[in-house]
Structures are given as C-alpha cells and as structure tokens.
Image (spheres, rainbow, N blue to C red):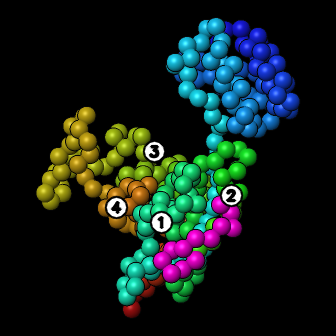
Amino acid sequence: MRNSSLNVANINRELRNTKTDILVDYIKSDNTRIMVTTNKIAQQSDLSIIDRCVKNSNNINSLQVEDSRLLKSKLYLKIIGIPYYPHADSREKLLSSDIETVLKQNHIFDNISLASRPRIIKVSPKSDIAIVWIDIWDVQSGCNAKLLINRCFNVGNYIATVRGATMNPGVSQCKNCWRWGHYTFSCRIQGAKCVKCNGPHKSEHHREFGWCYKANPKTNPPRLETKKGEPCPHSFKCSNCKGDHQADSNSCSFWKHRFNRKWHAKKYEEIRANKSQSICSQVNGSNPQ
C-alpha cells in the first residue's frame, strides 16, 4: 500500500466514529499480504471497518484482497474420560483417527481446526482410560478454547470432558547425537553423530564420510562404491531402537513414545543395564582361570 500513514489516519478516523477503543498502529504490506497492527485485539466489527477501508484505498484492487482475519496461535487442550480400548470385547487401542472422527461428529468442535494430530496415552500403565491432547488454532484472545474448556460430550456410553492444558513439548531429541532426553545445546559428546549411520560426522557429510558409500572388497558379498548422485542403497540401524531406519524416523518406537517420559526413562535404563551386563561378561571372559 502506498502512503501507509494516510491509510492509518483514515482507518483510525472510521474506528473512532464507532466509539471503539481499537486503533491501528501501523500498516505493513508486500506482494502477498497487507498486515495491519492494532493496539489491542480487534473484534469482528473492527475487522469489518478495517477491511472496508483497505479495499477502498485508491491503489488497491478490492477484487484481489481477501477478507481480513486475525492472526492465529496454537492453544493446547486435553480430553479426559475416553476409554483407551474403545471397542467392546477387543484390545484394539484408541487411535488418533478415532479421535478425529469423534471430533468431526460432535457439534461443539464445529468451528475448531486442529493444529496437529491428537496424541493419546494411558492415564496410568494399568488404567483403561486415556488422556487425549489436542492442539487447536485459535485467535490470540483464545475465545474458541474458552468455549470448549469444561464442556462435556459423549464418546459411546462414556462422557468425556475438555480441559485446558499447557504446552506438552514431549521428550526432546538431540540433533547432535540423536539420543532422546536432552536438547542439542546441552549435548555432552564431542563432535557429532550421523543420523543415518551413527558415524562420527555430521549428517550432511554422510556422503563424504559414511562407510556405506565406500567400496569394500573384503565383505561377503563385496560392497561396491556408490556412484555420486545416486541415493544410498543401504539400510541403517537406528542408534536408539536398532530398527531399520534413521534415528529421527517417525517409525521409531522412541519417536512414537515421545510424549511418554516414563517410557523413555525405562528404555534407557534397560539399555544401560544391558550395556553394563555386556561389559561384565567381557571382563569375566577375559580373566585367566
């Protein structure tokens, strides 16, 4: 928009005429959008005035301007009271797709847009009830979330309740060593590990330093050199679960349990115990009789 200061003055004049306390601070525009910043969170009536003023500007093609809308942020809710095994006479677990279907069928979620797929865990290891976390897109005032909190709805014969929740970032995965449970900036290893082969090099240097790209005639069958530009034909072992995938794969059991800290703690405790047992066995085996 040209002459933004004049447009700000015109919009504020219209807003004052409606006795609102909303005022435009400044306008920023580029080739794809026009961003109008106000002193407070605007209501729909304020947006209508701003929308009309922008479209009536001399250098604006109103046919190319969509209706104005508020910026949205991600808010966090949880649903309690849903069975972890929803199907009678079955041990089939509750799935994210089941929750999405339930939300679509219930009218209280009509105007709600999910920011990510629902996440499901048991209330406790021996419980048959689940806690479901949902992240939704909402305006900054959080009006949609406020309408949902403490609302109840049916899931089969059960009554579920929506509660407010804080952000649950889950268990962090280090992007340096690719282990779970600490952030990258607090990683204690020297150097870096490759997400593909767990070699002592950065992942982006896998092509130059990875063992799998180099020829090795001593293997059975002999390994040929991977030609430049061709994708790596070899499978890898995840450094966490030892599965046939990269360490950051969403098929990894550690990734699937990224919101379950107890599961991660138990897994790493088992790994440490197995490692200690292996070291003891090697030491005892090397002692002379």
Residue 265 visible? The answer is no
Q: Tell me the quarter of the picture where residue 172 sits.
A: bottom right
Task: Indicate which disc residue 202 carries.
Answer: 3
> Most extreme residue toward the front, as rendered?
18
Label located before the other in sequence (4 or 2):
2
Q: CA distance from mark 4 to mark 2?
A: 47 Å
Residue 24 at x, y percent in the picture: 78, 25
21 on left or right of 267: right
Nearest-to-viewer mark from 4 and 3:
4
Q: Nearer the viewer, mark 4 or mark 1?
A: 1
Marks 2 and 3, Cα distance to the nearest angstrom? 47 Å
Q: What residue would you read off at disc 2? A: 147
Task: Relative to 96, say whether 268 is above or below.
Answer: below
Given residues 142 and 171, the one toward you in this image is 142
Residue under the point 68% across and 29% down: 48
Q: Which residue is mark 1?
A: 102
Res 237 label: 4
Real-space CA distance between mark 4 and mark 1, rounded to the nearest whole angstrom: 38 Å
> N-terminal of the two: label 2 or label 3?
2
Q: Amino acid at mark 1?
A: Val
User: What quarter of the picture does the N terminus occupy?
Assistant: top right
Say above or below: 3 vs 40: above
Q: Closer to us: mark 4 or mark 2?
A: 2
Between the residue at mark 1 and the residue at mark 2, the CA separation in whole angstroms equals 18 Å
Per the image, label 3 sits on a secondary structure element best described as: loop
Per the model, the C-alpha gap separating discs 4 and 3 is 17 Å
In the picture, which quadrant includes the C terminus? bottom left
Q: Which residues are magenta?
A: 147-159
Amino acid type at mark 4? Lys
Contact check, label 4 and label 3, Cβ < 8 Å: no
Q: Are marks 2 and 3 in contact (CB under 8 Å)?
A: no
Q: Nearer the viewer, residue 230 or 24?
A: 24
